[in-house]
Image (tube, coloured by chain):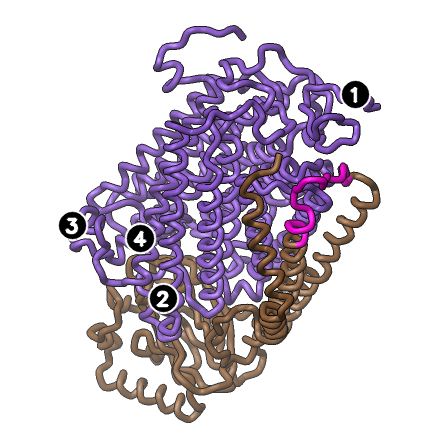
Chain colours: A brown, B purple
């Protein structure tokens, strides 16, 4: 009836319990919970957020952190309490209770809905609000930088509209592979279509991720608030070179950005050829496909 | 059914006896678990010791690269690890082995409804395993487009050489056929072969889980089968159902079509794997708390609701694909709805333990650990069900940690619980308890360190499926954490040797088990080992529910078999 190794577990639990009485474990746990209220339960930190709207995603994550820590904490405490209080031992009997009284059913259903209302409903509301206000709310004003991105195995091709403001024309500016420049504090709208397979445009510092699916042009936007160099990674498995599909996003002042664009345009006039960039050490296996680019789609 | 003579082949190989087929599935699943586990170790090796030759097996496996894992080998390993663990390890272990073994015994049936179909199911499954195994030794290696095998990467357009993908599709199609045969069998058996008195709400929850899971299989496996046939045509005959854009030579293909088809099946697949777990955990918690399962009918109803919901939430795997935003919102809402029935039956688990008399046997330890890891796995799903946080966490190590908590941790721990629990009925001997407890603690601790830290890595930005993550500056600081995970993963792998030793030692020299070593009430424990072909000498009549533990009407013991009338009950 009474398993001979049953006590081993109990002894362990009792040790933890006595230690917590002395305050050591308790204090540590308390600090952890306190920390989670504003910092997240994860002891590793995500890369710095340098985007206008990335904080919204961090907020959803932190809220979820806090509430699930509380709920899971309750579950763990209940488990520990049950393990100690209700362990099988001589002169202890289980209470026969099928838990099918109306009272219990009502309580569990209410608690189920409580979990839904306190977590799901809240993060859903936050998420919908953020999508409406930011992620799917494309900038309407004129001061917008438009970029076309064509990922390929295993590099990023970046294209700007040039002087006429229209894509797929002769004066388009194609940047060196894997190099994307954007001005700070200006909305950037990107349209993306891959050359070969599915890729995913991922900048951890901006909390952005958007798949590029063949046959589709996907549109997304973001805005930098801090100058610097950030990494672009491919987040969707795209072949053997998936891991080294790395681009650099340079965020700089408006003047510097304009200067960089002008320089590229001049160089292009000198040579008259875009495929100069083929020779660089870009990691691309096929070189830059000729004549890519598409007329800008109307934004969503 | 009377005793009858069987030859070695009809008894042990082409057996139509559900108990033998269950045991065959058990060995088959354990073999693949071992194989997939080795691949997991290789993945971890690469992430900690990139560029160093794999010791012992390296030179044997890849003489060309001198035992060093190259990017294409790495992609092959994680593709096969995922494929094998999901379809060839945990599917045969839970649904195959314990579904086959438990369903007829627990509902009081002589066998499955279609014994020959059952045999055919196992041997088709076996054949699919052979095809998959062979694909490892192709000159260009096995498939390497990930376990999801998204086209166009998985089609000739993707630029992956060799026939690995074709064999992957073939083996998966065979596997689907086998699963479908099993599913039809399970559903029919539960509906038609219950013993007199065994109403639906008198079935053990294990049977409920297996039954619902089989229904999902029967409904959704044909969908992936269609997708796989298309993928086969792409690879063999050059069709382009899933190719679009510059590389397409034929108009009208769509890569997203495959993703929809894959996840329409793929999300229910998660529940196909987890439903038996919920059933087993509910039953075992009740047995070892010596108390009826708390809110039995509510738990069963919640499982049914989730089964229904699981079919309409697949889009949450596709938030970042550029799918219509409106669909994203709808899928998010539907997905979050699942948390209501989930929390309700989770509370019922706690309710079962509440005021019980908990016996910390090895199966109980594993069962309680499922409550812990599934709680964590379920809650971390919230981050991924939400469109905005998923934008950041999608395709990151967070996702990897999350689904390992739900699939690897929950399903594996429940499989171990099931192995320790039913071993006496399957093989007549009880597994060693002390060895089992050491196995439990090593597995439980290392598994949590590994998978929790994987989630932390994802939160810190590391994305999945990277041969060498340290190409990126933002991942470089995460190298120590990756190293730590690798060490704990090795411990997790080594700990499984204890299970192997325990099984072999018990089969050879273990203590003979009594008829009902756990003092459980379900019907399989009324039978003496070895259970004859045909199971019950007389069809049992069922009087009581599956968990009438500690009923005050019981006098000298705290349990009663379902086939015994409870005296004094109204």
Which label sits in the foreground, 3 or 2? 3
- The residue positioned farthest toward the bottom in the image shown: A255
Instruction: Write down the residue under mark 1.
Output: B567
Question: What's the distance in space between the residues labelled 4 and 3, CA to CA?
Answer: 16 Å
Disc 4 + disc 2, Cβ < 8 Å: no
Instruction: Look at the image and give the residue range highlighted in magenta.
Output: A81-99
Question: What's the distance in space between the residues labelled 2 and 1, CA to CA?
Answer: 74 Å
Residue A151's disc number: 2
Instruction: Write down the residue under mark 3.
Output: B63
| Quarter of the rendering containing residue B514 | top right
Question: What's the distance in space between the residues labelled 4 and 1, CA to CA?
Answer: 59 Å
| Quarter of the rendering containing residue B25 | top left
Which chain letter matches label 1?
A: B
How many C-alpha atoms fall within 10 Å of the one at disc 3: few (<14), some, or many (≥20)? few
Residue at left 70%, top 37%?
A: B291
Residue at left 48%, top 65%?
A: B456
Question: What's the distance in space between the residues labelled 4 and 2, CA to CA?
Answer: 30 Å
Give the structural element (helix, strand or loop) at label 3.
helix
Q: Is residue A135 visible?
A: no
Which chain letter matches label 2?
A: A
How many C-alpha atoms fall within 10 Å of the one at disc 4: few (<14), some, or many (≥20)? many
In the displayed structure image, the side of residue B549 where residue B490 appears, left or right: left
Disc 3 + disc 2, Cβ < 8 Å: no
Location of the C terminus of chain B by quadrant is top right
Residue at left 33%, top 48%?
A: B39
Which chain letter matches label 4?
A: B
Q: Earlier in the sequence, mark 4 or mark 1?
A: 4
Question: What's the distance in space between the residues labelled 3 and 2, CA to CA?
Answer: 34 Å
Q: A265 or B162, which lies in front?
A: B162
């Amino acid at each position: 009836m009474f398993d001979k190794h049953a006590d081993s577990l109990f002894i362990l639990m009792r040790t933890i319990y006595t230690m917590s009485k002395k305050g050591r474990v308790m204090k540590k746990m308390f600090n952890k919970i306190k920390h989670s209220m504003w910092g997240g339960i994860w002891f590793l930190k995500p890369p710095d957020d340098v985007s206008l709207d990335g904080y919204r995603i961090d907020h959803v994550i932190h809220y979820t952190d806090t509430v699930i820590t509380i709920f899971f904490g309750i579950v763990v405490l209940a488990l520990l309490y049950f393990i100690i209080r209700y362990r099988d031992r001589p002169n202890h009997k289980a209470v026969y209770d099928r838990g099918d009284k109306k009272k219990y059913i009502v309580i569990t259903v209410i608690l189920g809905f409580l979990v839904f209302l306190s977590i799901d409903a809240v993060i859903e509301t936050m998420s919908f609000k953020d999508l409406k206000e930011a992620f799917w709310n494309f900038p309407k004003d004129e001061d917008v930088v438009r970029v076309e991105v064509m990922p390929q195995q295993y590099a990023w091709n970046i294209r700007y509209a040039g002087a006429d403001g229209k894509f797929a024309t002769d004066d388009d500016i194609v940047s060196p592979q894997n190099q994307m420049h954007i001005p700070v504090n200006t909305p950037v709208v990107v349209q993306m279509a891959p050359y070969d397979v599915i890729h995913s445009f991922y900048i951890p510092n901006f909390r952005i991720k958007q798949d590029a699916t063949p046959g589709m042009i996907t549109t997304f936007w973001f805005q930098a608030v801090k100058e610097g160099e950030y990494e672009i990674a491919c987040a969707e498995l795209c072949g053997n070179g998936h891991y080294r599909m790395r681009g650099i996003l340079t965020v700089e002042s408006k003047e510097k950005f304009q200067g960089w664009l002008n320089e590229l345009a001049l160089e292009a006039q000198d040579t008259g050829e875009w495929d100069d960039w083929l020779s660089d050490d870009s990691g691309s296996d096929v070189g830059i496909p000729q004549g890519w680019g598409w007329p800008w789609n109307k934004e969503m | 059914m009377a005793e009858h003579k069987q030859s070695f082949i009809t008894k042990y190989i082409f057996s139509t006896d559900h108990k033998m087929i269950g045991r065959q599935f058990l060995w088959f699943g354990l073999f693949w678990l071992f194989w997939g586990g080795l691949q997991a170790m290789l993945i971890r090796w690469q992430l900690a010791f990139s560029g160093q030759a794999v010791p012992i097996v390296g030179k044997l496996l890849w003489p060309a690269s001198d035992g060093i894992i190259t990017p294409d080998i790495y992609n092959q390993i994680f593709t096969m690890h995922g494929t094998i663990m999901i379809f060839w390890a945990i599917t045969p272990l839970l649904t195959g082995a314990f579904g086959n073994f438990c369903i007829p015994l627990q509902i009081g049936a002589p066998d499955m409804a279609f014994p020959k179909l059952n045999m055919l199911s196992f041997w088709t499954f076996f054949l699919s395993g052979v095809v998959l195994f062979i694909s490892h030794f192709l000159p260009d290696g096995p498939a390497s487009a990930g376990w999801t095998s998204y086209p166009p990467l998985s089609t000739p357009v993707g630029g992956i050489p060799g026939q690995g993908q074709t064999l992957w599709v073939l083996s998966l199609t065979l596997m689907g056929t086998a699963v479908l045969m099993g599913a039809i069998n399970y559903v029919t058996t539960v509906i038609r072969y219950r013993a007199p008195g065994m109403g639906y709400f008198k079935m053990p929850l294990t049977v409920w889980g297996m039954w619902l899971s089989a229904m999902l299989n029967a409904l959704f496996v044909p969908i992936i089968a269609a997708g796989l046939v298309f993928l086969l045509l792409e690879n063999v005959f050059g069709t382009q159902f899933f190719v679009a854009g510059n590389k397409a030579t034929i108009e009208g293909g769509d890569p997203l079509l495959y993703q929809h088809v894959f996840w329409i099946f793929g999300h229910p697949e998660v529940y196909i794997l987890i439903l038996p777990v919920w059933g087993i955990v509910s039953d075992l918690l009740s047995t070892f708390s010596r108390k009826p399962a708390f809110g039995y009918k509510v738990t069963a109803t919640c499982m049914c609701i989730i089964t229904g919901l699981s079919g309409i939430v697949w889009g949450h795997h596709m938030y970042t694909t550029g799918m219509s935003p409106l669909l994203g919102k709808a899928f998010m809402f539907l997905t979050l709805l699942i948390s209501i029935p989930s929390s309700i039956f989770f509370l019922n688990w706690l309710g079962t333990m509440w005021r019980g008399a908990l016996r910390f046997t090895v199966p109980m330890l594993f069962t309680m650990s499922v409550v812990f890891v599934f709680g964590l796995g379920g809650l971390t799903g919230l981050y991924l069900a939400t469109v905005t946080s998923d934008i950041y966490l999608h395709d990151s190590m967070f996702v990897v940690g999350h689904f390992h908590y739900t699939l690897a941790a929950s399903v594996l721990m429940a499989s171990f619980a099931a192995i320790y629990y039913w071993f006496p009925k399957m093989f007549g001997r009880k597994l060693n308890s002390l060895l089992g407890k050491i196995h439990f603690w090593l597995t439980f601790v290392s598994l949590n360190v590994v998978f929790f830290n994987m989630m932390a890595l994802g939160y810190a930005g590391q994305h999945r499926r990277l041969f060498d993550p340290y190409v990126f500056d933002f991942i470089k600081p995460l190298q120590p954490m990756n190293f730590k995970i690798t060490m704990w993963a090795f411990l997790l792998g080594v700990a499984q040797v204890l299970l192997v030793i325990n099984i072999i030692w018990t089969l050879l020299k273990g203590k003979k088990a009594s008829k009902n070593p756990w003092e459980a009430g379900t019907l399989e424990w009324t039978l003496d080992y070895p259970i004859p072909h045909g199971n019950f000498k007389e069809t049992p009549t069922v009087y009581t529910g599956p968990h009438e533990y500690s009923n005050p009407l019981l006098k000298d013991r705290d349990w009663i078999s379902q086939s015994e009338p409870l005296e004094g009950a109204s």
